[in-house]
Image: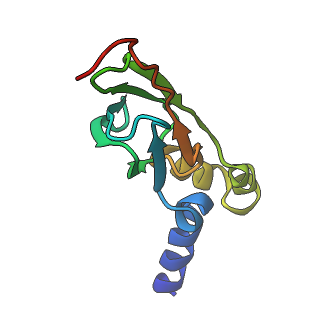
Amino acid sequence: MRFLLLSLAIVFAAGCATIVKGTTQMVAIDTPGAPGASCELSSPAIGARSVVTPATIELDKSQHNIAVTCRKPCFQDSVAMIPSYAEGMAAGNIIAGGVIGLGVDAATGAMNKYADRTSVTMIPVPGCSA
C-alpha cells in the first residue's frame, strides 16, 4: 500500500511538460550569407555558450530569453534574441497535475520553449578584404 501511494505521489508531483517535452531543446542558429561567424549566447539560465554558424545547440529550457551576439571579420557585429515562451501544455497541468505539476514544470523550465531556429543578419563592411 505504501508503494502504491508513493508511486501515485511521484506521478502527480512530476509536471506534464517535464515528462512529455523534457527540460532541454535543440536550437539552430544561422548567419545567412556569413557562415563561420562566431556567436555567443547568454542568459541567466545557460550562462555563456559559444557556437560557430551554422550550428545546432542543445539548451536548457528557461523563462529567460537568450541574447545572441555574432562576430566575423569584414562584417559588423550583429545581435539577436532567442525568445522564450510558455508551452501550450502548461495550462493542462492545472487539470492533470495541479499546482504541483505546474510548479515542477516552472522550476525545471519544461513549461517554456525557445524558437527552434534563429537567423542573425550580418552586414558586410564595405571595402573590407580580410
Q: Residue furthest top?
A: 126
The residue nearer to you, when weighing 30 against 127, is 127
* Image position, residue 48 (x, y; %): 28, 33
Identity of the residue drawn at 42% across and 19% down = 124
Identity of the residue drawn at 37% across and 43% down = 53
* Image position, residue 61 (x, y; %): 47, 46
Query: How many labels, in total?
Result: 0
Decide if residue 103 is on the left or right side of residue 123: right
Please say if 78 is above or below 3. above
Q: Residue furthest bottom?
A: 1
Quadrant in the rendering for residue 15: bottom right
* Image position, residue 66 (x, y; %): 45, 31
Q: How is the image coloured?
A: rainbow
The residue nearer to you, when weighing 15 against 83, is 83
Decide if residue 28 is on the left or right side of residue 44: right
Please say if 35 is above or below 124. below
* Image position, residue 56 (x, y; %): 41, 52
Identity of the residue drawn at 57% across and 75% down = 8
Q: Quadrant of the C terminus?
A: top left
Please say if 90 is above or below 121. below
The residue nearer to you, when weighing 111 against 75, is 75
Decide if residue 73 is on the left or right side of residue 43: left
Identity of the residue drawn at 53% across and 60% down = 18
Decide if residue 74 is on the left or right side of residue 8: left
